[in-house]
Amino acid sequence: MNPFVMRADPAATQAQALSVRGVGKTFGRTQVLGGVDITLSPGERLAIIGPNGAGKSTLFDVITGRTRPDRGRVLMHGRDVTGSPPHVISRLGLSRSFQTSQLFGQMSVIDHLRCAGLWPSGHRYTFWRRMRGLDDVTRRSEAWLERLGLDARRDVPAGALSYSEQRVLEVGLCAASAGDVMLLDEPTAGMSQSESVRMVSLIAELSRGRSLLMIEHDMQVVFSLADRIAVLARGVVIACDTPDRIRTHPDVRMAYLGEFADRFDVDATSEGRDA
């Protein structure tokens, strides 16, 4: 029997785009995830916040198949994908950006987008095929260039882009892969305020009609985008609720915010969240 054949869970709620059930992970003697439960509905934007070392990136690694959990399950649209290879999970409709750049420095912007568009356009990934001869893929990639505001950087190597342009490209690659579940790991980290505002607007646009799970430390970004917020601390979810309720949640303010509680005292209404 093929261990990577996905089977529907009869007990799963089909309405959930993504479901994480009791996921635990230990490295050596350190428990990083202590039984995480999270659900993501179709079209929902869910932000995960928490201090450094809370297990946020490890949770993303488990969801995307880069790390196998010690216990618990991950389901996409009711199908158990726990421990499946990343490429298998990706082809089921999940795309991810990383905390640090994963771009190919010598590859042009347009060729990055061509790669992202191969599978959605019905082409297989083959090393001997020249992507530039695939007119449908090129047309699709050109449209994405304009949508991302990178049309003037078409043939520029990704390594020559500014930091904010690289982040825009990475988020764009997630969307261009045509998955219906997007995972973004700190998409605005290291950006200026004006760059963050533009990124929030872009994410709001690109995630429309998709499910978004996002790790983010900038609370203004979180309150601008999230329908719900999950607070991860010491490997467990201590609260998961709407932004307004999380803002005033006593356990969240005590366990996570501490002296930085004023980070939650920001205006929760914004153009991004209303998108």
Image: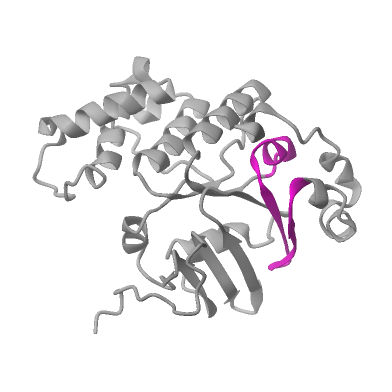
Task: Give left or right: position of 33 versus 248.
Answer: left
Position of residue 35 relative to residue 175, above or below, is below
Position of residue 245 relative to residue 13, above or below, is above
Q: Which residues are magenta?
A: 217-243
Give residue 62's position: percent from left, percent from top.
Answer: 50, 66
Give residue 224's position: percent from left, percent from top.
Answer: 68, 35
Give residue 258's position: percent from left, percent from top.
Answer: 89, 52
Residue located at (88% from left, 50% from top): 248
What is the residue that sits farthest to the bottom in this orientation? Answer: 1
> Which quadrant does the N terminus fall into?
bottom left
Position of residue 169 relative to residue 86, above or below, is above
Position of residue 153 relative to residue 222, above or below, is above
Q: Quadrant of residue 232?
A: bottom right
Specify whether residue 157 is painted magenta.
no
Task: Give left or right: position of 199 versus 102.
Answer: right
Specify whether residue 237 is painted magenta.
yes
| Residue closest to the eye, 169 or 147 | 147
Task: Give left or right: position of 98 versus 119.
Answer: right
Residue located at (14% from left, 49% from top): 126
